[in-house]
Image: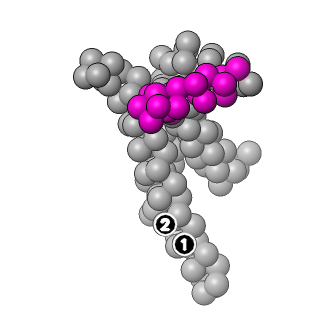
Amino acid sequence: MDAWKTSKFVSFAALFASGATLLCCALPALFVVLGAGAAWAGLMGNFPGLIGLSEHKGVTFSAAAVLLTVAGALIWHARSMPCPADVVLAAACTGTRGWSQLVYLIAVSFLLIGGFFAYAAPYFF
């Protein structure tokens, strides 16, 4: 597998894992705060696999953090790599780098929001 495919796989895996942290911890708290706890309970009844994310939140957060660290290192490394000489391909290369940084920041924010609701919020509320 070449470096580009590896980077793409790790980025998508990191986004998926950080999204899982939202499902395990942030969304249940949001639904309860909004008074829709019964709706969340109904959703859990239809998708019982989501309960496993909450039961194993340490593994979920650890995997997400490792994947985000690797993805961040790959994005950091790719920032100094040359883009093609062709104008169209160079524009696509630059645009893709910008989008990948944005998606990475969104994934990190998902992890931080999920981490807050999983570990810090129970002590505040």
- Magenta-drawn segment: 26-45
Residue at (43, 51) in percent of width and height:
105
124 with respect to 68 (left or right): left
Q: Quick one: SS at disc 1?
A: helix
> Where 120 falls versus 85 (above or below)?
above
> Where 59 falls versus 2 (above or below)?
above
**Front residue (pair 94, 58):** 58
> Where 63 falls versus 9 (above or below)?
above
Q: How is the image coloured?
A: one colour
Binning the other alpha carbons within 10 Å of mark 1 as few (below 14), some (14 to 19) or many (20 upward) gives: few
Q: Position of residue 84 (x, y in %)?
A: 61, 76
Which residue, given by chain and number where applicable, does mark 1 sit on?
A: 95
**Front residue (pair 38, 99):** 38
Binning the other alpha carbons within 10 Å of mark 2 as few (below 14), some (14 to 19) or many (20 upward) gives: few
User: Per the image, is 44 magenta?
Assistant: yes
Any part of residue 69 in sight: no
In the rendered structure, find residue 98 and report the number of the disc placed on it: 2
**Front residue (pair 23, 112):** 23
Q: Main secondary structure of the magenta part?
A: helix
Q: Amino acid at mark 1?
A: Gly
In the rendered structure, find residue 45 and report the number of the disc placed on it: none
109 with respect to 37 (left or right): left
Q: Position of residue 32 (x, y in %)?
A: 46, 28
